[in-house]
Every structure is written in structure tokens, then in C-alpha cells.
Image (cartoon, coloured by chain):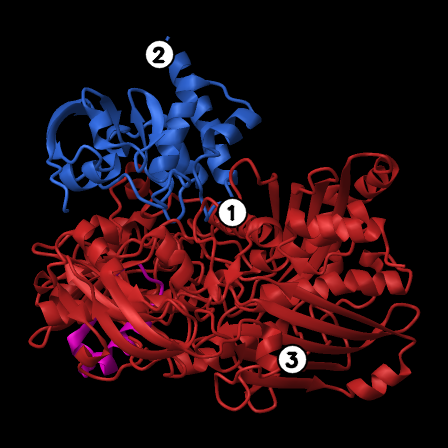
Amino acid sequence: MEKKFIGQAVPRKEGRDKVTGRARYVDDLAVPDMLHGVTVRSSIARGRILGIHFGEGIPWKEFTIVTAADIPGKNEIALIEHDQPCLADKEIHHPEEPIVLLAHPDRYLLEEARRAVRIDVEPLPAIFSIEDSLAKRAVIFGEDNIFKSYRMEKGDVDAAMAQADLIVEGEYRTGAQEQLYIENQGMIAVANPAEGVTIWGSLQCPYYIHKALLPIFNLPAEKVRIIQAETGGGFGGKEEYPSMIAAHAALLAWKSGKPVKIIYDRAEDMVATTKRHPSRTRHRTGVMREGKIVAMDIDFVIDGGAYATLSSVVLSRGTIHAAGPYACPNVRVHARAVATNAPPHGAFRGFGAPQSIFAVERHMDQVARAVNLTPEELRRRNFIHKGDTTATGQLINEDVDLNGLLDRAFRESDYYAKRERFARDNPGATVKRGIGFASFMHGAGFTGSGEVYLASVIELEATREGTVRVLAASTEIGQGANTIFSQIAADALGIGYDRIEIAQPDTGAVPNSGPTVASRTSMVVGQLVETAAHDIKRKLLDSGLLCDACTEDEFVRACRRYIETRGPLRSRAQYEPPPGLHWDDVTYSGDAYGTYAWAVYVAEVAVDTVTYEARVTDFVAVQEIGKVIHPVLAAGQIEGGVAQAIGMALYENVVWRDGRMANGQMTNYIMPTAADVPPIRVFFEEDPYPFGPEGAKGIGELPMDGPAAAIVNAIENATGICIREIPATPEVLMEAMAEKAAPLV
Amino acid sequence: MSEAVSRISIACRVNGEPRRVQAYPMARLLDVLREEMHLTGTKEGCGEGECGACSVLLNGAIVTSCLVPAVDAEGAEIRTIEGIASGAQLSAVQEAFLECGGAQCGICTPGMVIAATALLERHPHPDDAEIREGLAGNLCRCTGYQKIFAAVVRACESSAEKRLGAR
């Protein structure tokens, strides 16, 4: 059938409300008689709580005060493990641990009160680095501080390493990164024993919060209702932490009998909520003289912070992506997520992959140098193709063309000419220019059997007026879910884009289509929308009320007749895995993802050798993503991801002081501004994926994976210095350049 | 509040309408707009003048309303995002943001639209450097700014087309 909307840049569904300021975010909502809530947190990284003191000069009787003792059910935030308390009771495990909640109608008085609460603690030894955790300088989790470990092995790494002509080693590090959505986190709760708990908030995953609140309040599923307000960005930062804030607002509302709003200010949001896991990756690579990589031995460690939260799955994705898009017959990845006394690190676009891909794509340039090949020639000799297997042993059965992507990226960026020109012009220049690239892939959707466990469901419902509503828990967080679902449904039904409505995500009204994470919404949930829309159409056709080539008026009439004569016109679709996918959780092998998006990104940089600042001056992003559903939204995802990754590579430095973020302000945590971003030139190749809607693959996280390595590879091209850690701030560059200028004797 | 600071009466014009509110003199203009006037289109992103989400036009100049004390609004002409469209008719900047994909999550969008509007009032035909500088006080985490730059260019073009059409 002809596609009228898929592939077209239709207007964003909720765009008008956003450009006029009418879109209502959680802080724009108010409920009569509402109180404001705040959180009193620990002041040290680890210790025992001895007592809580409420200082003088505050009319405490006017306040609602909640501690762990007020929790009606279990004191835990249910996620994968249930180890994180909702409010710390006896022990403190990180410096931002919530301990006391306060509510009052006056926000200003509330802030004074928060400062007047003193937590008496007995400090305990704390650890703050991957090294200290692995060395067990203090044991803070289990017997060895390890939340999770994987050993993924293909072939015989030791034997192949022994036969390699050369072994190239390297260690690479990435720092924490703050998601820095511009809308701070916040929730409004109405809660009482009679009606249960209702939450409105800024969030990605309504059913995660639903799951978390049930045990805290001992309530049956139907007594907890989570509603998403317009959400001002997420990037993973609103995947798991919102459960904590929702629980806190609900506890205050439950005790006070009044609605309670908790809105974090920027400082609290930055220091207390999750960030990207810091990482350390060690590579040992066995390579033959002609450039064939025969063995990869990778040790990948991420800092999980104080509680397990999502670290095991972040680690999993990082592990699976750690060997890059290469066909190496012998691969071993030993991966660990370790505990430290920092606030738990969590989901952030890319979910472990940006860390391990930074390492492998920096390392590939080192391997190339070791065998006297150009970075591109080394990669060409090792790229994965159809018929090869990945590090998990997954047989690639799509027509992957990384050479083609590389060719196009080099052409669009004028790579060879620039490489030559920079080599000629750099000697003697204060500002050195360089160009570098990274090649990579990103698996879309949940890993392994994840999608089968999620078993996502969506529903479509037609109305008498001939509009069709999409009911899903998938959230619009800026990525364009509302628009894409509407395009897919409209084309499948053969009706206008404006006839599709997207129901507000509300656990009381929509089925669980799974979390809005893992680049899965367009590909996995979009496919369900398409299936359900076809089913509605078939019902109308089978009823004889509609003929195949109908006009829109006929469709409207058919809906009305159907509903009047036969009752509701609804359809439901549930996820079915593509045939032939097998994953083994025990050996960590098999089909890790249904498909991958593939990319080659080229970065051009200018490095000022006086100020030690590196700037990205041009950026080319070439990727194969199955099918572009919406060219403007798709390009917007790539451009936004690249900008965020430029921040990760060069600017965004979390300064830690005893487990606490010391620069929790936009003044001193620097993200890219309009003046910092280069032209980001985006090019798509399309090789339709049979199990995505119209062939689409997931793309949200892909652009976060490659830029950092491409940029640092370009810095090496410009300056000859080998940076192995990011962010590559001026301080890092200065040290590295000084070291190169004055080698140790 | 231990010190006896009392609210004062502040008169100003907001989006062309005369308004009078009671507010503490050092209350943030942002809070006065959002809480007293219920103009919630103006957003708070950082509370320290870094992100520009709270941008409004104060006597024609762009300001971050989180840093402006309410007392400064006395007698002022204020324009917020709610005053950019003329009824149902979006401004050229708003239309261009829709068309070019300048808004994703939308939280920076009101401030960004205000900044783009102020920029085009200063420079009706800005070059690339002027666009970047004009928007550098407004942070966006979603778009990587490319579609916002495109929207500003598009808004210039459509304004020029309109002027030509009007002749």
C-alpha cells in the first residue's frame, strides 16, 4: 500500500503546544491545597545513622515529616534487585541518600526547615574508585563489591593470542556524565488509604514506578496509578530515579492527607540523581602483521555506585558492544560492575555501549599504528560482514556494509584531502587540526531475551468519529514517539495523520508497552502499532462495512456503523520475537539483538596548543538504520546525540569529592552551547529490517556511541598525543602535551 | 521568614495587558509570572541564569527571569512566550520551529523562541556567527542546535516572503 506519512516530515504531534508554551510539564500543574515536599539527605558517604535532630526556630508542628518508620509497606525501590531503600533507616551508603522528607505549603520556609534538620552519623570507611572497589579497600557490597560480572567467550583467545604476530595493549577510561535534561525531575502525588496513590510526573517508564510503589504502600495494582505529564527530556535519567521521587511525594501525601509536589532544583537533580557509569576498559589484542585481528581480550569495569539498580544491564550492553563491529574469531570479555559509595549510576543513552565503544575505537587506532596500517585500512580488514559472527556468536544475516558506510563518510567529510592538508599545515601552527573517525554498531531493543520477558502490549481503539487512539505506556520525551506512532497507524489504516490520537500514558488506562528506553519505541512498539492498526482495518473489511480502497469519509462511516452495530472497535497487539532468535543467559551467547544499526562517524577538530582547548569543527554521521520513518525527527535524534557525545568527549566533567558531585551547577558543569557545536551533517542508508515497522531500526542511542572515539582519534591526528580518557578537558590535554614535550629520562 | 519583609504592589504590562500583582520585592520575576500570573510557559531550568529556559523580554531586552527581582518589573513592558503568537496565528519563529524540528522535548523551546525572536529583532538577517551567539545563552539538550539554527534561517526567509507579499 502507498505510504503517505511514513518517510515524510509531518508536523510533530504536540509541536504546537510546545512552541506556544501551552504544553504542561509537571511543575506547571497545581492541585488545590497542595503542599511542597523536600528531601533531607545524608552528608557523608558511608556511616550509621545515630539520630535525627530537628533544629530550633522552625514551627515543626506545621510540617509533615516522613522517615523510614512511616513507610506502610516495604522500604525498598523495586527494580531488578530490591537493595535500594526508599529512605535510609540505619545505614548510609552514599552522600545523597534520602533520610527525611518534609512537606509544607510555603516553599521558602520548607527550605529553611530542610537546612535545620541534622542527621547524626557514625562514619564508616568508604570507597570511591573502581580500583579501591576491586582492591576491597572496604567491602561495601557482598563479599567482593561486585554487583555483577560476565565472562563472554568465543573461540580460544589464549591459543590465538599465543600465535599472534603482535599483541597491542591499552587502557581507556570514561568519566561520569550527567543527562542534563533541561526539565528537572519532579512529581505530584495524591495518596490516601481509601483511594490509593496517583502520581503525575516527569518520567520515561510509567510501569516502573507502578511496580516500585506497590510494595511500598502494600497496595493492589489497581490502586496505584501513574500518569506522565509532558516530559522535558530524559536520556535515561528519567528511567529509574523517578520511582524514588514518586515514592517520596506519595509518602508525604499519604501522611499529610494532601497532594504533594516535589520538584528538584538543578543542584539537587545533578548531584542526587543518576549519571552515566564511569568505566575502565583494558584491551589486549592479538594481530597478524597484515592487519588481521585474531584475538581480543577485554576487561571492562563500570562503577555502579552504592546500589545495584540497573548496573547489571548497563554492564551487559557494554559487554556485548565491547568488541566493536569486527569479525574476530576469538573474543573474551570479562566484565564487572562494582560498588562504590557514590550515588547509584544509571541509565544514560547508550547504556554502557558508549563506554566500551570509546575504548575499542580508540584502541583500533593504536592497533593500526602497531601494524603500520592506516586506521581505515585496519578496520576494512576486520569489519564484520553478512555470514560472520559477533562476539556473542550471533550470525549476522543482514547485508551489513561497513565499507560502504566508511566510503560515504570519508567522501562527505573530504577525509583524505583534509588529512593531507592538516599534515602539511600543522607543523609550526598554534592551532593544530585533525580528523578522525569511529565505526560502530548499536543493538536496538532489549538485550537477549529481554523483549520476550517484557512481552509488550499496545491497544488501538477507534471512535464513532473515526479517530483512532493509540493506547501505550511508551512516553513522548522529545524523541517523537507521538508523531511516529501516528505516522505508522495512519498509513496502516489508510487514513489521515490527524485522525490518530495518542492517549496520555496512564497506567490506569493504557496497557504496558514496556519502558521508553533501549532505542525500542519506534522499532518494537511501533511494530505493535502497525500490527494492531492492520487488525482494526481487517475487522472493518471483514465486517463488510469497508472496502479496501476506501476514502477517509468511508472509513469514518464504517467506524461509526461498526461501533453502533457490533460494539467497541479495538485491537490489541503483543510482542512476538522474530523467528529464529536464540539467546543463552548462562553462556552469554547467541542472538543479542534482533538487529543492529551500523555507523561510521567522522570528526574534525582544532586543538589550540596555547589554551589546550579542543573544538569540534565539523562532524559527519553516516548510518544505516533500516528505514527512516521521519527524516527530520531521525536527523534530530542523531544531531542531538552527537552534541551530547561531544559533551562527553570534551567538556562534561563530573568533579567528585568523597563520592559527591562537587560541580552540580550549569555554571561549572559545562555542556555544549550553540556556540560550541560544529555543523553536524547526517546521512542515512536504508536496509529495511523485516521485523521493524516498514523496516525501521532503533536509532535513539546510536549517535551517543561513536563520537567520543572519533573526536579523540582526531585529537591524536592533530597533535600526536594519545589521550586514553575522557572528557579530554584542557587540563588533560595540557598534561598529555607537557609529557610529550618533555619525555621522562 | 523572620525579617518582616512585606509584599509590595507591582504594576506592569505583560503581553500587552496591564497587570498588577502583590509580590515580595526580591521574589524572582520567574515565580511572579508562573505563580501569580499563571503564565507557566516560561520555564525554570537552572535558577542561575545559565540555561535560558526562563527567558522573557523585559522592555524589549532578553533577560533570564530567574535572575530578575520582581521590583524591576514595576512599570515595565514584559513579553513572555504566551505573547508571541497573535491569537491562533503563530509567529514566523514559532512556525519555523515547527517546520524545521526546532522543538523536541519542548522545555527549552519557550526560551529559545524568545531568544530567536529577540535575535531577529536585533539582526533581521543574522549570519551563522550571529545566530550562534544570539542563541548561546539558551541551552538545549535534545537537538544539538542544528534544527534550531535552521528554524532561525527559515523564520528570516518567511518574514522576508511576507514583507514581499505585503507590497
Quarter occupied by the N terminus of chain A = bottom left
Dot 2 alpha-carbon crowd within 10 angstroms: few under 14, some 14 to 19, many 20 or more: few
The label on residue A40 is none
Q: Secondary structure at mark 2?
A: helix
Q: Is residue A124 above or below residue A229?
A: below
The label on residue A394 is 3
Q: Secondary structure at mark 1?
A: loop
Q: Tell me if A533 is positioned left or right of A568 in this view.
A: right
Give the mark count: 3
Residue corresponding to mark 2: B166
Q: Is residue A175 above or below residue A131?
A: above
Q: Residue at x 34, y 53 (%)?
A: A184
Q: CA distance from mark 1 to mark 3?
A: 37 Å
Q: Is residue A204 magenta?
A: yes
Chain A palette colour: red
Q: Which badge, 1 or 3, is on the more N-terminal residue?
A: 3
Q: Are marks 1 and 3 in contact (CB under 8 Å)?
A: no
Q: Is residue A681 above or below residue A267?
A: above
**Where is residue A16 drawn, in percent x and y?**
30, 40
> Which mark lies nearer to you, 2 or 1?
1
Write the start and end of the magenta stretch as one range.
A201-225
* Chain where mark 2 sits: B
Main secondary structure along the magenta-highlighted residues: helix
Q: Tell me if B9 is positioned left or right of A159 in this view.
A: left
